[in-house]
Image: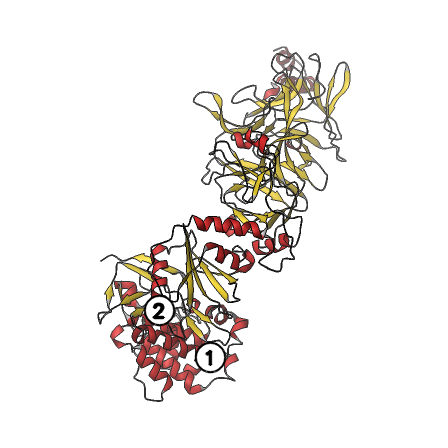
Amino acid sequence: MLSLLLYFGSSMEDQYIHLLFFIAFILLSLDCNSLDTISTNQEIKDGKATLVSEGEMFELGFFSPGKSKNRYLGIWYKKISYGTVVWVANRETPIADTSGLLKLTRLGNLVIRSGGNPMVWSSNSTSNNLVVVAQLLESGNLVVWNNNKMIWQSFDYPSDTFLPGMKLGKDLVTGLQRCLTSWKSPDDPSIGEYRYVHDMNGYPQTLRLKGEIVHGRHGPWNGLGYSGFPIEKENKIYSSEFVMNEREIYNKYELKSSVVQRVGVTWDGKTLIWQWIERIKDWIVYANADVDTCDRFSLCGPFGICSINKHPPCTCMQGFEPKNPEQWEASDWASGCIRKKPLQCGNGSGDRDEDGFWKIARVKVPDTRRAWYNVSMTLGECEMTCKGNCSCTGYTSLDIRNGGSGCLLWLDELLDTREYDVDQDIYVRMAASELEGNWHALDAKNTSLQMEQLDDIQCFSLYEVARATGNFSVSNKIGQGGFGPVYKGMLKDGRQIAVKRLSETSQQGLDEFKNEVICIAKLQHRNLVKLLGYCVHQNELMLIYEYMTNKSLDWILFDETKSSTLTWPQRFNIIHGIARGVLYLHQDSSIQIIHRDLKASNILLDSDMNPKISDFGLARMFVGHDTTVKTKKVVGTYGYIAPEYAVHGRFSIKSDVFSFGVLVLEIICGMRNREFSHGDRSDNLLGHVWRRYKEGRSIGLLSASLQASCVVSEVLRSIHVALLCVQHHPEDRPTMWSVVLMLVTERELPEPKQPAFFSGETCSEPESLPSVDECTITLPYAR
């Protein structure tokens, strides 16, 4: 008021001077709580001012914790839970009175001073530019800016609280290590006994330490979360991130909604996730990092496994026994387990008498401080690397997403392993003799299916199959189909075999398995794959075939490089062989069989490139003459299914004829029916061939690599026969007997009608079939 009176009662010059003083007075009188920044040489004095983030979520100032009278500079929540401290600057140098102040120097250094100590704490940040400012962000991060470039942040120096957006880990360029450290007590924020760190030894993982002793371990990042910490697959509250590159290794989390969360290490060693509940105006414990008893580090010792569902919780891994039985019986498991039989380190050559691996499913992986890793290896390469290193005790995938990738292997005892509800398996190295004993023990408890006695079809034991395939070694895996993985193996008599093992995710199951065994056991033909036997053990279902050197037709036919080596005589021979095999199924065998899944991937090739039809899981057997059936369930593979089957659920021998026709055109053109495209037209392969045929340009369908070896008359005849097979109406299609005759004789052929799924300018599938290629389907058909 005095300033105003002076202003109106003075000359113009005096009024201007008084106005400046008035403005300065108003600015100095403003409540500093409304500011989120301080500039060079400005001060935050204890009890006089604070910094408040723009949205008033956080506040920075001086405080006394609990019952203590010491003063500290800290950051706490303001809008909610006033007084919940998340960061402390001068943890180790408290101020005994209220003389403390925070100041930003002109070189960008934050310093705390007090009456008796000119330098209590410093950020040790420097800048060559004099334009600097310190700001408290809405995230709770105190930042020093130099012309909009950050030169220091409190998030790089966490206390006991892990906030969203904060990194925990190591800067590999500067060497800065970010970790959480507990308070000494509720009244003392100095560094306590407990730390929460990202350990960089071996493969990075999260550890909880008391002093230098490991108390708990979340384990390494596996692509979805931390091994050994619950993975919330549909988490709508927060998202976790792990980054590892040549500059830094860290983890952080971000909130997805307006929920307020914080993670902290308590003074007595608990690692908790707190969530603010506005309704009750208080924090609740959302999660506890100390999951249960099994979360105690290495409770069961080396090569022991902890399971919270067992009493007592500790058992030895397969092939191991307690190192100290008396202590073990007394529930002291720290000494762990030792091998029952010594390892015989081999050279990774695949010898069946060398060490193998026993799979332990669904586990928290062992301590990775003595582990080695490679992010680009496959699991098979990982196995071979482990086999070639006598110090390697086990291995697993580094990333469990999308079937697994990368390699993580252990070079020491396996510590802190536990059963866990997560899709991660480990493979533990064991002596071959121990593996043999385990398989025999399992076979003794085998509960086989009630299979009828079948001539020439052997029932193999699980041990025999496991031994032949190197315990289903990843290095022996040669393929993956709708039934499951396929492994190469060798029986004791030297015969090479292919083992199809039913996958847990397969849409095929017991019915298809029994169907194939019973069906193919009654068949003998040079163009059908030979089934040597089967294996049934509890939920394990396997089919054992003769091994085909050249794998499947699709493996060669649809690969640009491999396909160029497939000559016309070889292709024509493959077409003939498939035709003779299907004719045998339809007419010459003791029972009539409709295959229902003829496709390139189900045609195997022997060492002489002779074709053999495989996979009879979907086949149907008939007795008598009624071989047209209507079904409510459509099975087969897109691109090969006949229209009457796809749309109306009716199948017959003419359904196989249609599939054969598609297959012939794929063999001639070297392209998949469903993936074919040409110019601006939307034709599939059938439509494209039909147009070429009508224009008299069928020979142009051949690739350049076939022109030197082809016999033009054979090519044209094969295309003509294929078009007869893919006609829309089943009654228009020839039988396989007629097909074989037409392929080998020079008689005149009838004119084909337009193929199925062709309608003038466009070529389309029925609406009931999605546009997916090369996967076996099972679809309900509504009458």
Most foreground residue, 246 or 400: 400
Give the class, few, some or many, for how many residues have Cα within 10 Å of label 2's Cα (few <14, many ≥20).
some
Can residue 701 be seen in this snapshot? Answer: no
- First along the sequence among labels 1 and 2: 1
Picture coordinates of residue 639, whole percent (x, y): 37, 66
Picture coordinates of residue 71, whole percent (x, y): 67, 15
Q: Which residue is tagged 1? A: 702
C-alpha gap between disc 1 and disc 2? 21 Å
Image side of residue 741 versus residue 231, left or right: left
Quarter of the picture holding the C terminus:
bottom left
User: SS for tag 1?
Assistant: loop
What colour scheme governs how the chains and residues are painted in the rendered image of this protein? secondary structure
Give the class, few, some or many, for how many residues have Cα within 10 Å of label 1's Cα (few <14, many ≥20).
some
Q: Which residue is tagged 2? A: 763
Most foreground residue, 196 or 740: 740
Can residue 664 be seen in this snapshot? Answer: yes
Examine the rendered structure and indicate whether residue 754 appears above or below residue 262: below
Image side of residue 371 versus residue 699, left or right: right
Q: Nearer the viewer, mark 1 or mark 2?
A: 1
Instruction: Name the kind of residue labelled 2 in the image.
Output: Cys
Picture coordinates of residue 159, whole percent (x, y): 64, 27
